Amino acid sequence: DSGVTQTPKHLITATGQRVTLRCSPRSGDLSVYWYQQSLDQGLQFLIQYYNGEERAKGNILERFSAQQFPDLHSELNLSSLELGDSALYFCASSSHEALYNEQFFGPGTRLTVL
Amino acid sequence: KNQVEQSPQSLIILEGKNCTLQCNYTVSPFSNLRWYKQDTGRGPVSLTIMTFSENTKSNGRYTATLDADTKQSSLHITASQLSDSASYICVVSARGSTLGRLYFGRGTQLTVWP
């Protein structure tokens, strides 16, 4: 158990809908990272937050957004969902700001868009 | 172009045998290299992390090597067990900016048969 929690574990929704994924980092970690993993792709870095502020952006679509709250939990919002958004979404956390520090991954949320 | 290439894409071995997974990278400036193990449907778990000055690092039956000159790393698994069946992902970190960048390989899918 990495100490990172994600909810929900599974999510099934329809195209065009909006969903919110939630992540709680390890105790004491200030950085939260979001990743997408599709069947035919490796892990794709989406976005990083550090202590409430956006720090780095990867291949995140404009339909997706995230935020980190004062209690350091983070939410990833996915809107106008398309079939291709079906994937595993992972959250990771670390104690430092830099991307090259070790990250601890949560169990993931499996999103299925029908 | 910064890239991380892993080989083979998939591998099947018999329980008790050894195997070696490869990771070649062109990432620069290099910061560190990590190997993650990802069980199906679960979050990646860090196995080893190596910096420029480290040639070998072990974690139980897992031994990672790094040749920073040739930009190659390998992960050797000794006396494989059924529980070693998983995807093994090589992740290379680059410095250069304040936060650095992460580059992910697409993983090697290892299957261990009884």
Image (cartoon, grey):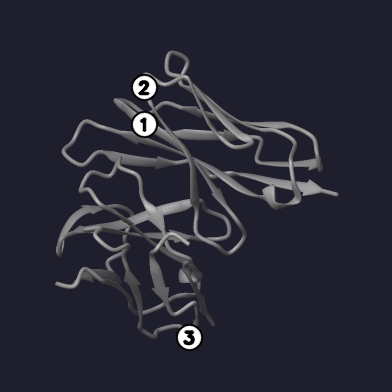
Residue at the image position 25 percent from the left and 32 percent from the top: B95
Front label number (3 vs 2): 2
Q: Which mark is residue A13?
A: 3
Secondary structure of the residue carrying numbered label 1: strand
Q: Amino acid at mark 3?
A: Thr
**In the rendered structure, are the residues bearing label 2 and label 1 in contact, judged by CB atoms less than 8 Å apart?**
yes
Q: In this rendering, would B112 be left or right of B45?
A: right
Percent position of residue A75, x then y:
28, 73
Chain containing mark 3: A
Percent of width and height locating residue B77: 66, 34
* Mark toward the start of the polypeptide (2 vs 1): 1
Q: Are the residues at dot 3 and dot 2 in contact (C-beta closer than 8 Å)?
A: no
**Could you tell me which chain the residue with mark 2 belongs to?**
B
Report, in whole angstroms, how far the alpha carbon at label 3 lies from the one at label 1.
Answer: 39 Å
Tell me the distance, in whole angstroms, between the alpha carbons under discs 2 and 1: 6 Å
Q: Inspect the image, locate mark 1, and give the three-letter code of the amino acid beneath it.
A: Asn
Residue at the image position 25 percent from the left and 58 percent from the top? A29
Locate residue B52, reporting x and y percent: 36, 22
Residue topped by disc 1:
B32
Residue corresponding to mark 2: B52
- The image position of residue B23, as x and y in percent, is 54, 30
Residue at the image position 21 percent from the left and 31 percent from the top: B96
Question: What residue lies at 54% left-to-right and 82% top-to-bottom?
Answer: A114
Q: CA distance from mark 3 to mark 2?
A: 45 Å
